[in-house]
Image (cartoon, coloured by chain):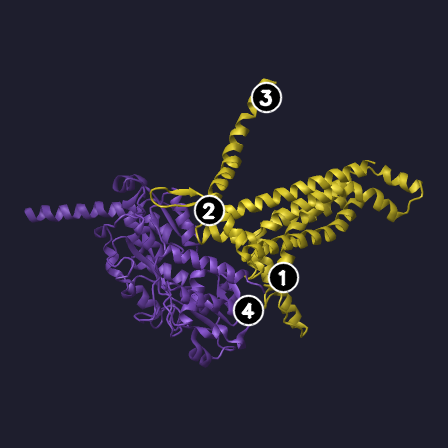
């Protein structure tokens, strides 16, 4: 008798459980999470086509989805008092938000899918135990080049210094942000990209200034994707995920990771301290880590997934990014670094970067 | 009468919230800087000192003014004949021509500038056509030419419409009187049409110069990031380095420059009018 009751109870539980999941409605969500609206603030063009609508359907909630195009823009809005439930900032910005007490600790028991995390995004220096953040995408920065016009031997011999090889003058795109440009210069000179040594900063500034004078580079942001797909220039400093997109669209383009090291970055999901709906936010983070959502995200956007299974599948034989050397980030190379948060350095580099760009032609 | 005065109240409240308050905030930010934890901000002139003591910012300012002046002159030289021509026509044709000038303005400026990127690109429309005839490729994008082209293209409708309006308001009987008195076409243009269209020219200049001097999107898109104008510096202070104080100070300096140029235009306008009335 007892057994029968137990079976019945389990069946009922399962049924009600299914009811909650399958045919969820706004009321169920309110009961379960306290609200049926989730506010997500993410990078532009950074999510799979059906991820939001599937999440809404499955959990019977409404997602208010907004996008930003720089960490600083996101930070500015957050400081202005706007409230979101889930944000997706980058490594150094998460470090800053943690320092300034603007995030809440995650309840990892609500995020069982954290066991799916890819090896490359475990134990990241800014949040080693995932106390505040769960990785979303990750990648590196490298050089996309046109294999018909750029000699791979030159790239291998010169590394980042090829961006100052006058053989290719007028043929390169640089990334228009102080962080990424100074990373290139620091690495080309053999320094750490988190250096605070004034001599090294000055040397990097001169490197960039000289590059501007001798190479006539175009400083662009997202335009680099279209520019390289159309083959307007022969070389470009590009984020790995954008590079994966370029390579998928134009067969002449290849991706090269200089031996001098690169910026190993990651963007991760966090819940701000003033979030109105943290329970549902946990559910969303867990959902993003699931196989289906991760696959949709990574396939659509081209950045490396934080889900190991998806990462393996997309980069292996028959996978969507098979043979695309830009998709899978280099892992465990000791010259690759993660950006650290340093306001003083950042401000200094911003001013120097304006000088590089405004310098006399 | 009193009732009507009360009706202005919502407008006053609105303008206080939307115009005066933000202006005050800019002034406040411009004269302060981030302090320590105890005193969150302190009053200072450092932001202004920094701007005027660093040659790079003065260079950028000079370049912005120069680009704006060139743009305005180009708009005037190209826009005046067009406006004159439209004012000469009549009826349906006139309506059509005015419409043609206005239609591009229905499309967002950003989109139109992106279109120019596609046209001027190294492998864009022009170079593809040139390549078809075995010519080129020539570098068009990320040059001074591209930036000025983008500016003139975006702002010239303001110039044309202003001049056209003042030309079409002109009383034609002046011209008839002039020809009765034996003036030739050039004389009547120089002595009658030109002075009477001056108010339109001046407001056209204002409407082109002001957006041109503070524009940051066009130089960014068509100048390939190498073309830093004052608008770009302000943008980077707010969005990249997060230094609102310095950004506000530069905005304030720009506001003062714009006010001075408005004042000068007004002055010229007044003297022009008194001359025209002679």
Q: Which residue is mark 1?
A: B144
User: In whole angstroms, how far apart are the C-alphas of marks 2 and 4?
Assistant: 31 Å
Q: Between residues A274 and B190, which one lies in front from this camera angle?
A: B190
Numbered badge on residue A213:
4
Which chain is represented by purple in the image?
A
- Find the residue positioned furthest to the top: B2
Q: Are the residues flagged by discs 3 and 1 from a single subunit?
A: yes
Which image quarter is the C terminus of chain A in?
bottom right
The residue positioned 87% from the left and 49% from the top of the image is: B186
Q: Nearer the viewer, mark 3 or mark 1?
A: 1
Residue B157 left/right relative to B193: left
Residue A75 left/right relative to B163: left
How many C-alpha atoms fall within 10 Å of the one at disc 2: few (<14), some, or many (≥20)? many
Q: Are the residues flagged by discs 2 and 4 from a single subunit?
A: no
Q: Which chain is disc 1 placed on?
A: B
Q: Which chain is disc 4 placed on?
A: A
Q: Between residues A317 and A226, which one lies in front from this camera angle?
A: A226
Q: Which residue is mark 2?
A: B245
User: In whole angstroms, how far apart are the C-alphas of marks 1 and 2?
Assistant: 31 Å
Measured as percent of width and height from the top left, residue A89 is found at 36, 54
The residue positioned 31% from the left and 58% from the top of the image is: A135
How many C-alpha atoms fall within 10 Å of the one at disc 4: few (<14), some, or many (≥20)? some
Decide which of tag 1 and tag 2 comes sooner along the chain: 1
User: In whole angstroms, how far apart are the C-alphas of marks 1 and 4?
Assistant: 16 Å
Chain B tint as drawn:
yellow
Q: Which residue is mark 3?
A: B4
- Residue B89 appears in the rendering: no
Q: Between residues A38 and B241, which one lies in front from this camera angle?
A: B241
User: In whole angstroms, how far apart are the C-alphas of marks 3 and 1?
Assistant: 53 Å
């Amino acid at each position: 008798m007892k057994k029968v009751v137990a079976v019945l109870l389990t069946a009922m539980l399962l049924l009600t459980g299914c009811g909650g999941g399958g045919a969820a409605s706004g009321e169920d969500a309110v009961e379960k999470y306290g609200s049926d609206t989730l506010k997500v603030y993410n990078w532009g063009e950074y999510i799979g086509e059906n991820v939001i609508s599937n999440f809404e359907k499955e959990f019977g909630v409404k997602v208010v989805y907004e996008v930003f195009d720089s960490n600083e823009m996101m930070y500015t809005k957050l400081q202005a008092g706007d409230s979101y439930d889930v944000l997706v900032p980058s490594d150094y910005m998460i470090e800053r938000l943690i320092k300034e007490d603007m995030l809440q600790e995650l309840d990892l028991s609500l995020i069982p899918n954290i066991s799916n995390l890819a090896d490359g995004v475990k134990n990241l220096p800014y949040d080693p135990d995932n106390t505040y953040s769960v990785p979303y995408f990750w990648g590196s920065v490298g050089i996309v080049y046109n294999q018909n016009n750029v000699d791979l031997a030159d790239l291998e011999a010169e590394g980042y210094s090829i961006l100052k090889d006058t053989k290719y003058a007028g043929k390169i795109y640089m990334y228009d942000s102080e962080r990424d440009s100074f990373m290139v210069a620091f690495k080309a000179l053999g320094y750490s990209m988190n250096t605070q040594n004034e001599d090294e900063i000055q040397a990097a500034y001169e490197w960039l200034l000289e590059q501007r004078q001798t190479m006539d580079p175009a400083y662009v942001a997202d335009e680099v994707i279209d520019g390289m797909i159309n083959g307007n220039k022969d070389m470009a400093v590009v984020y790995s995920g954008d590079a994966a997109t370029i390579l998928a669209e134009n067969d002449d383009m290849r991706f090269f990771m200089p031996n001098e090291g690169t910026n190993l970055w990651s963007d991760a999901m966090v819940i701000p301290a003033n979030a109105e709906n943290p329970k549902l936010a946990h559910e969303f983070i867990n959902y993003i880590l699931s196989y289906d959502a991760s696959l949709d995200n990574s396939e659509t956007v081209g950045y490396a997934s934080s889900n190991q299974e998806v990462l393996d599948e997309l980069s292996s034989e028959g996978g969507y990014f098979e043979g695309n050397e830009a998709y899978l980030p280099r892992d465990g190379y000791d010259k690759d670094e993660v950006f650290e948060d340093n306001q003083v350095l950042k401000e200094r580099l911003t001013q120097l970067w304006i000088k590089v760009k405004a310098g006399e032609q | 009468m009193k009732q009507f005065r009360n009706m202005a109240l919502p407008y006053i409240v609105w303008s206080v919230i939307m115009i005066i308050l933000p202006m005050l905030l800019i002034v406040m930010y411009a004269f302060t800087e981030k302090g320590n934890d105890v005193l969150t901000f302190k009053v200072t002139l450092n932001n202004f000192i920094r701007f005027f003591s660093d040659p790079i910012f003065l260079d950028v300012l000079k370049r912005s003014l120069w680009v704006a002046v060139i743009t305005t002159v180009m708009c005037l030289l190209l826009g005046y004949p067009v406006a004159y021509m439209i004012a000469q026509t009549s009826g349906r044709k006139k309506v059509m021509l005015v419409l043609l000038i206005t239609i591009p303005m229905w499309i967002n400026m950003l989109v139109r500038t992106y279109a120019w990127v596609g046209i001027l690109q190294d492998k864009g429309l022009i170079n593809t056509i040139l390549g078809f005839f075995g010519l080129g490729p020539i570098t068009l994008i990320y040059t001074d030419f591209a930036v000025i082209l983008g500016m003139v293209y975006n702002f010239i409708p303001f110039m044309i419409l202003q001049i056209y309006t003042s030309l079409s308001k002109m009383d034609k009987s002046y011209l008839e009187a002039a020809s009765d008195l034996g003036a030739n076409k050039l004389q009547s243009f120089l002595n009658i049409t030109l002075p009477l269209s001056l108010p339109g020219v001046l407001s056209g200049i204002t409407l082109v110069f002001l957006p041109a001097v503070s524009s940051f999107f066009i130089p960014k898109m068509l100048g390939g990031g190498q073309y830093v104008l004052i608008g770009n510096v302000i943008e980077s202070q707010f969005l990249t380095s997060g230094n609102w104080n310095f950004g506000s100070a530069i905005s304030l300096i720009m506001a003062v420059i714009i006010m001075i140029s408005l004042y000068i235009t007004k002055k010229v306008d007044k003297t022009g009018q008194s001359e025209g009335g002679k």
